[in-house]
Amino acid sequence: MMFYLYKLGYFLSKILPRRMCYVLVEIVTMIAYSASKTSRRELKENLRIVFDEKASEEYLDKMVFRVFRNFGKHLADFFKVTKYSKDSLSKHVKFIDKQYI
């Protein structure tokens, strides 16, 4: 199922404006979050280690959802960047010390 969500996201990120992609990411995030019980559990355990077991269960659940959402936004941006030329990308990104690129 996840493979098809990636393929759908890739296709839609090419044709939709960025804001619309982010709205779609919110919807897809809820689906992925609901369908990925094992990933949620593993991520929560990792976050529990990071927060040294001081975070509440409610806080960890919120953080897990945020990780899913931010990963979705990151993927949408990543997929979208592949369609930009060097010139159009420079309109969205500020390059510092270009000689190192």
Image (cartoon, rainbow, N blue to C red):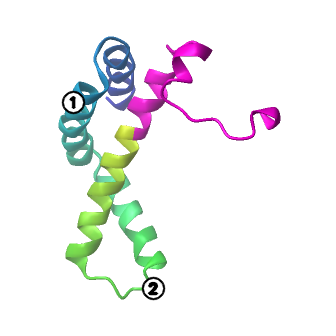
| 87 relative to 5 in the view: left or right | right
- Which of the numbered marks, if any, corresponds to residue 9? none
**How far separated are the C-alphas under marks 1 and 2?**
34 Å
| 35 relative to 52 in the view: left or right | left
State the residue position of label 1: 24
Q: Tell me the element at label 2.
A: loop
**Which three-letter amino acid code belongs to the residue tagged 1?**
Leu
Taking depth in this image into account, of 3 and 78 the one nearest to the observer is 78
- Which region is colored magenta? 74-101
Q: Position of residue 53 (x, y in %)?
A: 39, 86
Which residue ends up furthest to the right in the rendered image?
99
Q: Position of residue 82 (x, y in %)?
A: 53, 18
Q: Position of residue 90 (x, y in %)?
A: 56, 24
Q: Nearer the viewer, mark 1 or mark 2?
A: 1
Instruction: For the N terminus, give its image quadrant.
Output: top left
Q: Are marks 1 and 2 in contact (CB under 8 Å)?
A: no
Whether 82 is drawn above or below 67: the answer is: above
Residue positioned 35% across, 39% down in the render: 72
Image quadrant assignment for residue 57: bottom left
State the residue position of label 2: 52
Residue positioned 20% across, 33% down in the render: 23
Is residue 29 one of those drawn in magenta?
A: no
Q: Residues within 10 Å of mark 2 (few under 14, many from 20)?
A: few
**Which three-letter amino acid code belongs to the residue tagged 2?**
Asp
